[in-house]
Image (cartoon, rainbow, N blue to C red):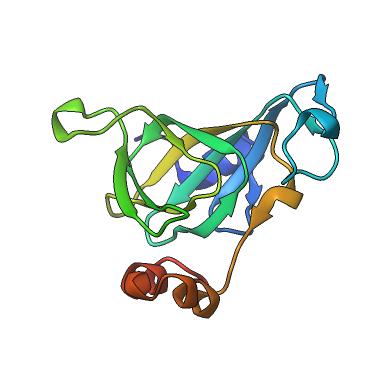
Amino acid sequence: MNTSINDLILKLDLKSHPEGGFFKETYRSIGEINESNLNAQYKGKRNYSTCIYFLLTSGGFSAFHRIKQDEIWHFYNGSPINLHIISELGVYSNHHIGINFEKGEVPQFVVPGGSWFAAEVINDNTYSLVGCTVSPGFSFEDFELKSRKDLTTIFPDKEQIISRLTHY
């Protein structure tokens, strides 16, 4: 990889994300869905769709969080990502987002809305550049980031992975 992490952050104009990593919104549809056409969990209207660049670096992670919408991850460059998901029912799954099909990686993956999920770079001393598409469009009103203690209270049998992939 010839591009440095700092070069990517500058070239793509990325900013720190509250869950970890760096991001930039690259698309927000002009069209909107009225609240009356969304299910009851949404307050206010939402854009049809949004998309971001998302950059993770080795040694860092995207902490367990959830949103109401499905989120589609698209792999672009760098190391594959290890995506950890805990469903609303507490079922844990692990998926590798990348392009090495022989190792079971997939270049695109959908995280179901309402699931708790976290991500980390698989390889050392590198980065992962992905895109994330959300529909209805992302709003921080739909974003939830719990403390390690609160999330472990909900899923006590997942304490080890939660402790490793939460910030506080």
User: In the rendered image, which quarter is residue 100 located in?
Assistant: top left
| Most foreground residue, 108 or 159 | 159
The location of residue 46, given as percent across then percent down, is: 78, 33
| 119 in relation to 165, above or below | above
| 139 in relation to 21, above or below | above
Residue that sits furthest to the left in the current view:
102
The location of residue 115, given as percent across then percent down, is: 49, 50
| 86 in relation to 129, above or below | below
| Most foreground residue, 149 or 121 | 149
User: In the rendered image, which quarter is residue 104 located in?
Assistant: top left
| 131 with respect to 76 (left or right) | right
| Most foreground residue, 119 or 1 | 119
> Which residue is painted at 44% across and 60% down in the image?
60
Query: Where does the N terminus fall, quadrant-wise?
Result: top left
Residue that sits furthest to the top in the current view:
31
The location of residue 140, given as percent across then percent down, is: 73, 50
> Which residue is painted at 72% across and 46% down in the image?
41
- Counting labels gives 0
| 116 with respect to 50 (left or right) | left
Query: Where does the C terminus fall, quadrant-wise?
Result: bottom right
